[in-house]
């Protein structure tokens, strides 16, 4: 296992003593699902494809040294074994120039047209080959999120029917889970074959389901078991009996399950990334339907439950909030999230980093990209003209004020990883 997190030469020059402290990060929104035949490529819609050099400068302006980032899979993976690295070559060279350490996001909600969707059984092997090829081309990269938000990818595509395959049945849902998590596991193995000290940040949506009434208790219990499925399979953690029956009743085989239980050896390379929004807690009705509950427990208690289940180091990998009518709601949300991070650290949870996602405003995320209206969602550190928002200035202050305090104990990464060896 590695002794310290490695940097590009430019990163090492700006890191105190060449070692990282707390991982303050932002991200470039690179979602690209297909919605009723239309590719929603947020890198293009938000202008990063032409303003990437400017965007990297803004990452450093706000004070971040880490960036959740990746090239568009559908534009880079052209066919099995055939890749167009032109955009990645330019942008990853730019990251090194700017001294930014990427957490490389290889698949963000969508697949290339030749694969079709997440029902395709060829996806895991094709994607793993791509991940290995990426690692060979960019051997200096150490931090990866192979498949972003595996749970949400499966839910939105094959349970709610919003994206990609647009299916709403349990068998399609379990098929999506199997293919998505298998792709993630195989990609980790392919990357480790090239870079044995690679680290994987599983950026995953952190959820909780509350029963609205006693008659909804069994529905909420099921959903609170279901929320762990992707991470259970990814980490080789045994699912409970209800979830095991659900998986096998809907197409997962015993051989599939044994494959996933064999992934436990990857745990020493993993950081459990938790994503948190105001929409991550749900109120379950007696008919099993749900609606958003707003924040009831909040980030810290729900993340603590995930940490107690997996006992892995943690990173807060996504959050944002609209700035609101008075322009200050996003700033209040930032400080609330930060209070949750500090609460967990005070309680002894090895929490390594925090991420405001994303660098710039987004497009149409108020409808989860389902409606192509061009609606700007004011959730970024900067607007789409690259002017700082109030939350961007607040995040810069937070980073400036806390970086030296959190760095006093040296690198937080290695001790946390040592705990899971």
Image (cartoon, grey):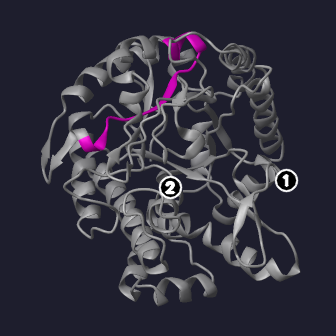
Residue at image mark 1: 296
Q: Nearer the viewer, residue 192 or 124?
A: 124
Left/right of residue 315 with respect to residue 323 in the rendered view: left
Left/right of residue 251 with respect to residue 140 in the rendered view: right
| Badge number at residue 405 | none
Task: Classify 70 as above or below 169.
Answer: above
* Labels 1 & 2 near each other (Cβ < 8 A): no
Left/right of residue 215 with respect to residue 364 in the rendered view: right
Q: Which percent across, then down, holds residue 399? A: 68, 19
Mark positioned earlier in the residue sequence (1 or 2) = 2
Left/right of residue 400 with respect to residue 189 in the rendered view: right
Residue at image mark 2: 268
User: Is residue 69 one of those drawn in magenta?
Assistant: yes
Work out which residue is located at the far front of the displayed protein and give it: 373
User: Is residue 302 one of those drawn in magenta?
Assistant: no
Q: Nearer the viewer, residue 30 or 284?
A: 284
Circle 2 packing at 10 Å, graded few (<14), some (14-19), many (20+), is some
Q: Residue at x 42, y 50 (%)?
A: 109
Q: Is residue 262 visible?
A: no
Q: Which residues are magenta?
A: 58-74
Quadrant of the rendered structure where residue 7 is?
top left
Task: Classify 10 as above or below 5.
Answer: above
Q: Residue at x 57, y 16 (%)?
A: 16
Task: Indicate the quadrant containing the C terminus: top left, top right, bottom left or bottom right.
Answer: bottom right
Circle 1 packing at 10 Å, graded few (<14), some (14-19), many (20+), is some
Whole-angstrom CA distance, mark 1 to mark 2, is 32 Å
Q: Nearer the viewer, residue 52 or 63?
A: 52
Q: Residue at x 31, y 61 (%)?
A: 117
């Amino acid at each position: 296992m590695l002794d310290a997190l490695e940097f590009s030469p430019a990163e090492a020059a700006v890191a105190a003593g060449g070692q990282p402290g707390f991982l303050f990060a932002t991200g470039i929104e690179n979602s690209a699902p297909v919605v009723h035949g239309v590719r929603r490529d947020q890198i293009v819609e938000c202008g990063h494809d032409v303003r990437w050099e400017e965007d990297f400068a803004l990452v450093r302006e706000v004070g971040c040294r880490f960036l959740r980032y990746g090239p568009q899979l559908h534009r880079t993976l052209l066919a099995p074994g055939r890749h167009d690295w032109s955009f990645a070559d330019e942008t990853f060279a730019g990251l090194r120039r700017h001294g930014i350490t990427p957490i490389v996001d290889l698949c963000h909600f969508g697949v290339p047209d030749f694969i079709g969707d997440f029902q395709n059984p060829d996806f895991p092997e094709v994607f793993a080959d791509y991940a290995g090829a990426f690692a060979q081309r960019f051997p200096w990269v150490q931090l990866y999120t192979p498949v972003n938000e595996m749970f949400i990818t499966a839910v939105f595509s094959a349970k709610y029917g919003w994206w990609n395959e647009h299916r709403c049945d349990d068998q399609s849902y379990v098929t999506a889970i199997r293919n998505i998590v298998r792709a993630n596991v195989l990609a980790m193995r392919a990357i480790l074959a090239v870079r044995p000290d690679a680290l994987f940040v599983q950026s995953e949506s952190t959820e909780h389901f509350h029963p609205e009434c006693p008659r909804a208790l069994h529905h909420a219990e099921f959903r609170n078991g279901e929320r762990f499925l992707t991470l259970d399979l990814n980490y080789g953690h045994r699912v409970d009996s209800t979830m095991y029956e659900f998986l096998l009743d809907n197409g997962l085989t015993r051989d599939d399950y044994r494959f996933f239980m064999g992934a436990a050896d990857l745990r020493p390379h993993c950081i459990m990334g938790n994503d948190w929004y105001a929409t991550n807690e749900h109120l379950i009705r007696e008919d099993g339907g749900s609606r958003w509950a707003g924040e009831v427990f909040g980030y810290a208690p729900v993340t603590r439950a995930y940490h107690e289940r997996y006992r892995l180091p943690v990173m807060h990998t996504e959050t944002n909030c609209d700035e609101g009518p008075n322009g200050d709601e996003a700033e209040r949300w930032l400080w609330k999230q930060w209070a949750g991070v500090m609460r967990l650290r005070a309680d002894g949870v090895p929490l390594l980093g925090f991420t405001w996602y994303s660098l710039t405003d987004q497009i149409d995320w108020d409808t989860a990209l389902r409606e192509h209206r061009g609606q700007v969602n004011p959730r970024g550190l900067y607007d789409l003209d690259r002017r700082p928002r109030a939350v961007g200035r607040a995040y810069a202050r937070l980073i400036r004020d806390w970086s030296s305090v959190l760095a006093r104990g040296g690198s937080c990464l290695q001790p946390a990883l040592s705990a899971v060896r």
